[in-house]
Amino acid sequence: MNTNYHPNGGSPLLLTYVRRIATVFAILLVSISAYSQTKLLRFPDIQGDRVAFTYGGDIWTAPASGGTAIRLTAHPGVEVFAKFSPDGKWIAFTGQYDGDEQVYVMPSTGGVPRQLTFYPARGPLAPRWGWDNQVYGWSHDGQRIIFRSLRDSWSLPIARLYSVSIEGGPTEPLPMPTAGSADYAPDGNRIVYSPQSRDFRSEKRYGGGQA
């Protein structure tokens, strides 16, 4: 795959990515309006007329137009960062089972999750550092899953993006040496990404100085 990356450019791609995430959150809020007492619905993703999200440590899906939510997982561990495959048939996610965070995939209608990565995770980490093996999305053809890993990192803020086949097998590093969040462009040949992950840093809301 001829995948180009743009560490300092690609602002149109970034704008498109931000708008897509904003749309997902807006639709999720609409879809759960009937459940106004439900709190902490997190990490939404949308595909067609379905929304996937995490609630109570499990993955749920619901109609984008509103309706009954369906719980897909019920493991004592935590499942987060659900991402639909391009055809909507699969959901990849990060599962924290027995203290180890790995990449899993399951049918979008529910079923037994299948583990795809096995390199020992650095987690569980303090909340400000986020998650190891965090799933970010899929390749354009739906054959590979992108995730962020600390496996070769010398420092917790420094990580790298990898991909793994939906069938499992060896993971492959993406070309950028360090990265945080990322997603493929619609043409499948480019990636928009951030150099570092700051998703869970508490000081990003701090308004004072550093003295």
Image (spheres, rainbow, N blue to C red):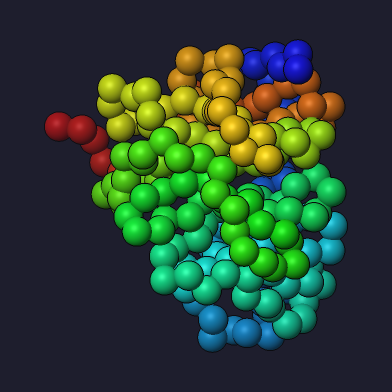
- In the rendered structure, the answer to whether residue 62 lies left or right of residue 42 reads right
Image quadrant containing the C terminus: top left
Q: Residue at x 42, y 56 (%)?
A: 96
Q: Residue at x 69, y 78 (%)?
A: 69
- In the rendered structure, the answer to whether residue 187 lies left or right of residue 6 reads right
Q: Quadrant of residue 183?
A: top right
Image quadrant containing the N terminus: top right
Q: Residue at x 62, y 64 (%)?
A: 112
- In the rendered structure, the answer to whether residue 121 lies left or right of residue 33 reads left
Q: Quadrant of residue 36?
A: bottom right
Q: Residue at x 36, y 50 (%)?
A: 100
Percent x, y of residue 17: 69, 38
Q: In the displayed structure, would residue 163 be above or below residue 89?
A: above
Number of marks in the rendered image: 0
Percent x, y of residue 33: 68, 80
Q: Is residue 94 visible?
A: yes
Q: In the displayed structure, would residue 107 be above or below residue 178?
A: below
Q: Is residue 128 visible?
A: no
Percent x, y of residue 162: 55, 28
Q: Please, which residue is most extreme toward the left here?
A: 211
Percent x, y of residue 43: 56, 57
Q: In the displayed structure, would residue 41 be above or below residue 158?
A: below
